């Protein structure tokens, strides 16, 4: 196996470790962070089950964003189509990670291709929105553009791989299955695949240290996830006990 293959196998394991440990660490930090006030946006559920029911349309349809004005509606379109197409792309990619490929992964292949095409358009809406809205441009930081550009680059290199610079998918699959089974294999001989793959590794490493952790945060955001019971139970932050 070539030296470059060894390097990329090692980098993939490192990125997976940073992502997993970094994500878990953030979950623990969030868990330990006191939320001293009852700030559920009312009317709010009176029970934990009610909170779960409240969060479902929030997660599936970004419900509260839909209630905003025109600017939020644009964010909704870009954000919702981005997230759904991202999910479908990842599910389509599972054919590269399983042998044999499960039937349900096969049944998502066609819609996954459409998602791949919608993906950069949704991201373009999100990035144009940051440039064209004065208020937003003022509060946007380098990190806000960085992550959008990184994900656009992943999507575009993926589309190039599919439509213009074909790579040998048998080699790709052997490489990925080698990683999964802890028996490292040869890196495919395709510079574009190496770029696509490297960008994904960068995203994995960056994820736990970035705003992308909203993926977990949405589940525990006090305004949405607190039970509305200040009269039934006294709310005391752990540090005040
Ligand atoms: C953040 C995660 C990823 C995103 C957003 C992404 C995005 C895309 C997109 C949009 C395409 C074109 C449409 C398609 O064929 O599905 C694609 C193709 C491709 N991606 Fe990814 N990708 C990701 C992760 C990966 C990973 C981890 C691998 C390594 C196995 C990979 C390997 C490939 C290959 C080999 C193709 C070409 C498929 C073909 O020729 O049919 N991608 N990717």
Image: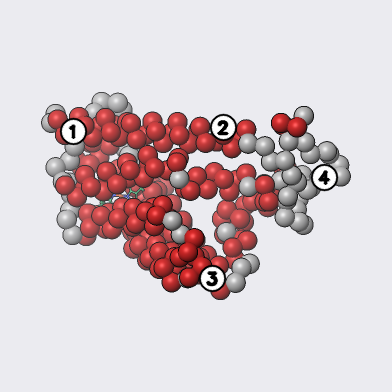
Query: Between marks 1 and 4, how big is the CA–CA gap?
Result: 58 Å
Q: Which residue is mark 2?
A: 28
Nearer to us: label 1 or label 2 = 2
Q: Which residue shows up at 40% across the image and 48% down it?
A: 91
Mark 1 or 2, nearer chain start: 1
Q: Which residue shows up at 16% across the image and 47% down it?
A: 191
Q: Which residue is mark 3?
A: 71
User: Residue 170, labelled with which disc?
Assistant: none
Query: Between marks 1 and 2, how big is the CA–CA gap?
Result: 35 Å
Q: Which residue is mark 1?
A: 5
Query: Between marks 3 and 1, how big is the CA–CA gap?
Result: 46 Å
Query: 110 and 10: which one is in front?
Result: 10
Q: Quadrant of the N terminus?
A: top left
Residue 79 percent location from the top left of the image: 48, 61
Q: Is residue 189 left or right of residue 97?
A: left
* On screen, residue 47 above or below 65: above
Mark 3 or 1, nearer chain start: 1
* On screen, residue 237 above or below 203: above
- Secondary structure under badge 1? helix
Quarter of the rendering containing residue 64: bottom right
| Mark 1 Cβ and ligand 1 under 8 Å apart | no
Is residue 114 something that shows in the picture? no
- Secondary structure under badge 3? helix
Check whether the beta carbons of the residues at disc 1 and disc 4 lie within 8 A of each other: no
Q: Which residue shows up at 47% across the image and 48% down it?
A: 212
Query: 125 and 181: which one is in front?
Result: 125
Residue 70 percent location from the top left of the image: 56, 73
Q: Which residue is mark 4?
A: 230
Is residue 20 something that shows in the picture? yes
Check whether the beta carbons of the residues at disc 4 and disc 2 lie within 8 A of each other: no
- Secondary structure under badge 4? loop
The 10 Å Cα crowd at callout 1, few under 14, some 14 to 19, many 20 or more, is: some
């Amino acid at each position: 196996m070539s030296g470059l293959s060894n390097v990329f196998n090692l980098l993939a394991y490192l990125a997976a470790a940073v992502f997993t440990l970094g994500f878990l660490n953030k979950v623990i930090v969030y868990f330990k962070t006191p939320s001293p006030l009852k700030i559920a946006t009312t009317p709010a559920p009176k029970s934990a089950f009610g909170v779960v029911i409240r969060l479902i349309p929030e997660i599936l349809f970004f419900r509260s964003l839909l209630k905003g004005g025109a600017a939020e509606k644009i964010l909704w379109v870009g954000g919702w189509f981005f997230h759904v197409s991202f999910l479908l792309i990842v599910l389509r990619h599972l054919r590269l990670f399983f042998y044999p490929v499960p039937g349900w992964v096969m049944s998502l292949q066609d819609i996954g291709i459409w998602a791949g095409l919608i993906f950069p358009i949704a991201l373009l809406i999100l990035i144009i929105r940051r440039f064209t809205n004065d208020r937003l441009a003022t509060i946007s930081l380098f990190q806000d553009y960085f992550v959008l550009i990184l994900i656009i680059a992943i999507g575009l290199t993926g589309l190039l791989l599919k439509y213009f610079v074909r790579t040998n998918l048998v080699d790709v699959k052997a490489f990925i299955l080698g990683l999964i089974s802890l028996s490292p294999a040869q890196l495919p001989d395709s510079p574009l695949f190496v770029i696509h793959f490297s960008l994904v590794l960068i995203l994995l490493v960056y994820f736990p240290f970035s705003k992308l952790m909203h993926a977990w945060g949405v589940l525990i955001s006090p305004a949405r996830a607190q039970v509305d019971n200040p009269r039934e139970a006294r709310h005391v932050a752990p540090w005040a006990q």
